[in-house]
Amino acid sequence: MHILLVRFSSMGDVVLQTATVNWLKSLLGSDLRLTFLTSSEFVELLEGHQEIHRVIGFHRRKGEKWENLVQRLKDLHKNDPIDLILDLHGTLRSLRLKVSLWTIPALTVDKRRWERFLLTKVRNKFLKKFFEHPFFGLSPQVERIIEDFENIFSDSFGKKRTQSFREGPHDELTSLAPFLTTEISRPYVVLAPSASFVPKRWPVVSFVELSKKLLHETNYDVVVLAGKEDTFCEAFNEVSSDRLHQLQGKTTLKESMAFLSKAKLCIGNDSGMNHIAEAYGVPSLTLFGPTDPRFGFRPHGTKSRILEKELSCRPCSTTGKKPCHRERHFCMEEMTVEEVFKNVKEMLDQI
């Protein structure tokens, strides 16, 4: 059987879909071939994954025309017939793809848009509690997609294998290709101060102060990972220590993955870096502000934690893109360095 998985973005969401990859492979075994279609900038995330047969990148930002992508997929279908398309994105773009490949059966994920939108509009703390109940469908995404699609394998064998996968010894569910070494030999923690949208970021000055406390009060090195465009991370240049590794803008995605795979802990915002860390079994501490863990993107590892402030104004948007309308960014600024460090210290003590 050959299944085409479609998820164009974003980085964290692509990583989370590896839970679906692992489930399908455990269910259908060696006869299954998986092709994963994503944006070209995320191809590195999935390259070398032992359960993915082929990764296809859509070079939209480099000017590739949609017709070229469709033709590539038609050529693939001709040479290696695709039995099913699993649309894990659920956007107009993925709909357009399914229309272009209309002869191939397709299933589309339910993104719970209505439930997430409704949660952003509820301002009463008591009413928000109802969103923790299963009938709202806001379970963790790594479990939700399996719940949505497991009925297509509703025979007794499929049900048994799915239950076995859910109850298996691994609680990380997601996975990425392994790395052997990094250039840092001492134990270290990773700070990931960036996020796709500014309102989702804990203040960089707080991250800097946290790095100082880690260096002064623990024996761990500190690695800062961020992209070239995240120039606000230059604030770490004020920290004078050979145990601080300021790698903002200095690593490729693959190199960042290597550093995350060997870390003892990752501390970051609601972003892809934390999901990558968990895919390597590395505990993460995720700081939630304008978004909400109940959207389904919370850490799923048993050793991971979240921090958030219970405020009537949050969550204020489903993606964290919406600018804060208050005089201060309370949801992020009210999380103190001392509070975050206390959780970090407790998590490190359990390693």
Image (cartoon, rainbow, N blue to C red):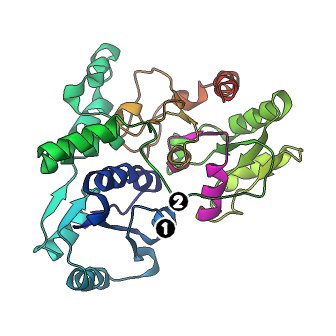
- Is 133 one of the magenta-colored residues? no
Q: Which residue is drawn at 22% across and 83% down?
A: 74
Tell me where residue 258 appears, x and y as whole percent. Answer: 64, 57
Which quarter of the figure is the N terminus placed in? bottom left
In the picture of the structure, the residue carrying the numbered disc 2 is 177
The residue depicted at 27 percent of the width and 65 percent of the height is: 31
Segment colored magenta: 254-275
- 296 or 187, nearer to the observer: 187
Question: Residue 47 has which mark?
Answer: 1
Name the quadrant containing residue 77.
bottom left
The residue drawn where x is 41% and y is 56% is 14
Q: In this view, does 166 lie above or below 93?
A: above
Taking the view exactly as shown, the residue that stands out farthest to the top is 126
Query: Is residue 161 rendered to the left or right of residue 172?
Result: left
Q: What element carries label 2?
A: loop
Mark 1 element type: loop
